[in-house]
Image (cartoon, helix red, strand yellow):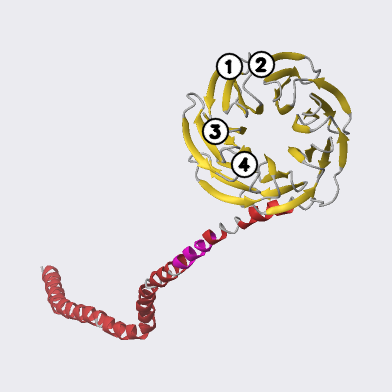
């Protein structure tokens, strides 16, 4: 019993001491927790040391902001160069006119081999040669005074054959193997095989035929003595139409579906419709027009008695210019850039720039030259009073 009381007495003491110690411990624990919480303020006092970190934080953002203006400078350079580049394109048009003088200079270079001396070669033909045609290898010459045609080799002037034709042959036309000869003394056209002289046909035409032209289907004849022109079927020689023109027609030029005629006795040229013969235009030129050439755009007329050349527009007949020539120009030949003029009275041949009429060269030839032919690279001239054909250039 005493022992049991003793145990309860000890237990009660323990409980009481615990009741006294626990609040103290709790108070101490509370005090401990408060002291452990107070150090953080001291930690915040150490944070001010890290201002070095704070500047690095804010400045890094500010530079990125200051970099954004950089697009503005990049815009300004691109704008200024672009306008300055466009002006450089403007000079380019000024270069395009510069080529124009070059063509003008080029023709002047070609006449360099223009000896104003003797001919390269002289070949004897028939009497009073009056017309020439060529095919590049061979040359045919109509001899008005001996009523024949001479066939020559252009390489060496060798006489290959002589063909008899009508009286006073004055004009020639070559079409493939066919050679048409206008016989002014017998009022006829003789058709021959150019390479063997066989006479294939004879066509009767007007009085004193002096000029021939061919358009691929029809053969045109100017009859100087009957003041008309005729259209014949080239294959058969049938006369399909006869058109009255001026006095003494001496030359023809075909222009599309139109025909130009030089009337030597009327001092004019006429433009006719090929299908109807209607006279569409009559233009006065110089005195005694004897020869016509055309490039389809322009028409050149040799005026034998006024020693000049008239230039007309083929489409309208407007007179555009007059070029000076030698004495008594009787024949013209156009080779593209150059206009060749045979001056029968001054015994020479002139080479003119067709576009402006500048005389680029003058070649002395034989006596009374009547006609000329450019058969590249040579120029052939028939001298009526010398009974020769000469090769120049």
Residue at image position (33%, 85%) is: 48
Mark 4 lies on residue: 288
Mark 1 lies on residue: 239
Describe the element under mark 3 as helix, strand or loop. loop
Q: Earlier in the sequence, mark 3 or mark 4?
A: 3
Marks 4 & 1, CB-CB < 8 Å contact: no
Q: Quadrant of residue 97?
A: bottom right
Give the foreground label among 2 and 4: 4
Which range of residues does the magenta coloring cover? 83-92
Q: Residues within 10 Å of mark 2 (few under 14, many from 20)?
A: some
Q: Quadrant of residue 173?
A: top right
Q: Which mark is residue 246?
A: 3
Using the image as rendered, state which of residue 339 and residue 69 is in the foreground.
Answer: 339
Instruction: Specify whether 366 is left or right of 105.
Output: right
Mark 2 lies on residue: 203
Q: CA distance from mark 2 to mark 1?
A: 9 Å
Using the image as rendered, state which of residue 100 and residue 77 is in the foreground.
Answer: 100
Residue 61 visible, this orientation: yes
Describe the element under mark 4 as helix, strand or loop. loop
Q: Earlier in the sequence, mark 4 or mark 1?
A: 1
Q: Earlier in the sequence, mark 3 or mark 2?
A: 2
Residue 176 visible, this orientation: no
The image position of residue 340, as x and y in percent, is 70, 44
């Amino acid at each position: 019993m005493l022992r049991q009381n003793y145990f309860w007495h000890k237990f009660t003491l323990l409980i009481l001491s615990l009741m006294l110690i626990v609040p103290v411990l709790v108070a101490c624990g509370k005090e401990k927790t408060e002291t452990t919480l107070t150090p953080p303020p001291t930690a915040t006092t150490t944070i001010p040391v890290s201002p070095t970190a704070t500047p690095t934080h804010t400045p890094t953002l500010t530079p990125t902001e200051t970099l954004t203006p950089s697009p503005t400078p990049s815009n300004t350079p691109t704008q200024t160069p672009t306008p300055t580049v466009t002006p450089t394109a403007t000079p380019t048009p000024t270069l395009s006119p510069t080529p124009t003088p070059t063509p003008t200079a080029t023709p002047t270079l070609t006449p360099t081999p223009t000896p104003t001396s003797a001919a390269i070669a002289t070949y004897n033909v028939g009497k009073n040669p009056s017309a020439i045609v060529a095919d590049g290898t061979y040359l045919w010459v109509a001899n008005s005074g001996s009523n024949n045609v001479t066939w020559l080799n252009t390489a060496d002037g060798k006489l290959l054959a002589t063909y008899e034709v009508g009286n006073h042959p004055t004009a020639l036309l070559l079409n493939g193997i066919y050679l048409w000869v206008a016989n002014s003394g017998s009022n006829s056209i003789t058709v021959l095989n150019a390479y063997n002289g066989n006479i294939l046909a004879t066509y009767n035409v007007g009085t004193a035929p002096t000029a021939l032209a061919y358009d691929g289907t029809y053969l045109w004849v100017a009859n100087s003595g009957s003041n008309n022109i005729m259209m014949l079927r080239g294959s058969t020689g049938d006369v399909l139409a006869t058109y009255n023109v001026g006095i003494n027609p001496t030359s023809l030029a075909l222009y599309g579906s139109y025909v130009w005629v030089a009337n030597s006795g009327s001092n004019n040229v006429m433009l006719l419709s090929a299908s109807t013969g209607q006279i569409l235009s009559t233009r006065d030129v110089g005195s005694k027009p004897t020869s016509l050439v055309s490039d389809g755009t322009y028409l050149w007329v040799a005026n034998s008695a006024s020693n000049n050349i008239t230039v007309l527009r083929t489409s309208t007949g407007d007179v555009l210019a007059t070029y000076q020539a030698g004495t008594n120009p009787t024949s013209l030949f156009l080779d593209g850039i150059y206009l060749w003029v045979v001056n029968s009275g001054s015994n020479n041949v002139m080479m003119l720039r067709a576009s402006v009429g500048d005389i680029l060269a003058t070649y002395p030839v034989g006596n009374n030259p009547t006609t000329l032919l450019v058969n590249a690279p040579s120029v052939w001239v028939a001298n009526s009073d010398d009974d020769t054909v000469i090769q120049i250039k």
